[in-house]
Each structure stands twice: as structure tokens, then as C-alpha cells.
Image: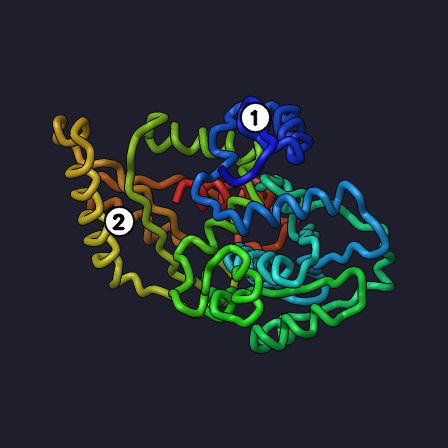
Amino acid sequence: EFITGTSVNGVPEWAAHLQDKRTSLGVTDQKHIWDPDLPRWLLDYTQFHAEALANVTDDTSFLMYTCDPKKWRCGGTGDRLLGMVQLFYLALLTGRVFLIGSFGPFPLTDTVVENLIQWSFMPDTPMSDARMIHAVYMREPASLQLSKLQEDPVRLVLASCNWFHPGKWWQSAAMKQYLAKYGIDPTATAPPKQLFRWAFHVLFRKSTAVQLQMRTMKDELGLQHRDRYVGIHVRIGDKYQGWGHDRRTPMSALGAFLECGQRMQQVVLSDDAETANDGHRPIMFVASDSHAAKARLAEMDNTTRSVDIVLFHTDLSSPHVDGAKVGNLALWAELFLL
């Protein structure tokens, strides 16, 4: 429906190289590669991206998310993902090829790999000829950011960013101009709730290492392949980890988290006849930066489950301590389980 010229398995011909790359990694589950909800205007950008990289010229311009943890804080995993999505849409609206160069504290490709676009491509432009845009610049109004980038003659722009406000982008003049040829007026509607999910799907799929980590976690949680479960994320912000965070959620609020999870268990029961027939509430998976919070929730409700992992913060933990690499994989596996 969206793209002409597809192969027998539904993968566009221009993306065949990505299909081959995924297959060579030994990841055989191909059914989640294409999201049927992706809009035409977004799929058209993936085609533009592929064609641009297939024929790179001196006129090809790039926008690369980057983070050098030796020079500045880039935020945790959530902050970084928000920044990548923000810059992805900025590249789309300014006709630039979006790239990601994220290598610290561990290479991003340890945990996620390319899905629909080849964001790990490294242009031959010397870094000395690139322009670096810091997060402060990225906090300027969307219209100003877009006009600056559109007028910037620099071929390679490197950017650091850790936030995403979909409303500003969806209703910007640039988005209205971009979507006009698709018959869409973004200023007349609220931004689609799927904006982040769409971008994430275009960019990423789970690495083999994370898939294996998830399989191990599911076994430990007692989850079968197709079991439905409820996921809860409790961010306490304990300072005992040495991260220096202010508290995000007091331990006294755990009851509210549990009550929410129990309500969702009832939703699953009412929506799943097979589960309802056996009378068992689905497992409540708890991910948290606090071992104490997970233990307390387990005492409060025997359907809660958690995995004993090495707690790792992308921006604040040291990558050199024992278990840091395993902790990073566990962090992403928990994220995908949630």
C-alpha cells in the first residue's frame, strides 16, 4: 500500500541490504520489522534515506546524533532516546540523512541495531569540517532550529540533545509544509500519540544479545512465550547507588503503583478468556532502580516478579566497574520487557 516494488516477503527492494544484514546475524524473527501503522510520509523518508546512502555525493547532507561522555553528560537511556527521536524528525524536515554515533559508555549497537534505516553509516567528511550543535541550541523554538539547519551549508552537523516535545514539531510551519503533499494539516490536529513509537520502530530493533537476555529474564520470571503480563517501572532515585540523584518516588508511594498494577491485571483477565478461566492473575513484572522497592512490592503482592540484575545508569554509572556491561544489557532487556 505504501511503497511500490516489494519482494515476495513484503520487504521493499531498496531495503534488501538491511534484510540481508539482519538474517546474517542469525535473528530469524522477521515478523516485527514492518509496522503496518507507519504513515506514508514516514516511509517515504526511509526510502529517501536509503537512496541517499546508495549514491552519496558532495551535496548529501547529514545530521548525526552524538554523545561524547568524556566531555559532557548526555542523560540516561530515556533522555538519549528522546534526543535521537527529536533529531530524527529534525533530519526528516530539513532533508538531511539521519545518523547515530553513540559509543559511550558502551556502543549503542550492543543493545539495538538498525531496523529500517542505516543510521550507523559514517560519512567521509572530516570531523574538523563538521559543526557541533549542543543541547542548548536544540532547546530553541522549533521554527528557529529548522531555519538554522536548513540554511546551514555545513555537510555534516553533529548534535547532542536529550528531549523531545512532539507538540512543537507536529504543529510547526515546517511540518505543515512537509505534510501538505500528503493532504495532512498538522496544525488542525493534536500530534499523534505514536510519534515516538513510529520513530523508534524506524530506527531500532533488538540486538541478538538483548533478545537472549530477554529470553533468560522471561525464564526467570516464569513467563512463557505468549504469556500476557503487567509491567511496572518504579524510579526511586536511591542515592546509595552513588548516582547522586534526588529521590523520584518515595517508598511510601509503592502502594499506589501496586494498586495501578492490580487494576491492569483485572483488565488483562477481562480481555483474555483463557487466563480468566484458570482464575490466576497475570504476573506483575517490576523493574526498578531500587532492590528495596522490588522486595517490598513482592511482600505486598505474591504475583509480583522481578529479576536480580546489576543496576546500571547509562550516564552516571562507571562502565569500568565489574558487571557494567551485563548491567547495560539488562537495562535494555528490562526496557523492552516493559
275 left or right, relative to 141: left
Residue at x 51%, y 44% (from the top left corner): 201
Image location (x, y in percent) of residue 86: 56, 61
Residue at x 70%, y 57% (from the top left corner): 96
Please state the total of marks drawn on the protein image: 2
164 left or right, relative to 224: right
The residue indicated by pointer 1 is: 27
Image location (x, y in percent) of residue 88: 60, 56
| Foreground residue among 294 and 147 | 147
Q: Earlier in the sequence, mark 2 or mark 1?
A: 1
249 left or right, relative to 88: left
Q: Residues within 10 Å of mark 2 (few under 14, many from 20)?
A: many
Q: Quadrant of residue 21?
A: top right
| Foreground residue among 258 and 275 | 275
Q: Quadrant of residue 11?
A: top right
Tell me which amino acid carries mark 2: Leu
Image location (x, y in percent) of residue 334: 44, 43
Mark 2–mark 1 distance (CA, rounded to whole Å): 35 Å
The residue indicated by pointer 2 is: 297
Circle 1: element type: loop
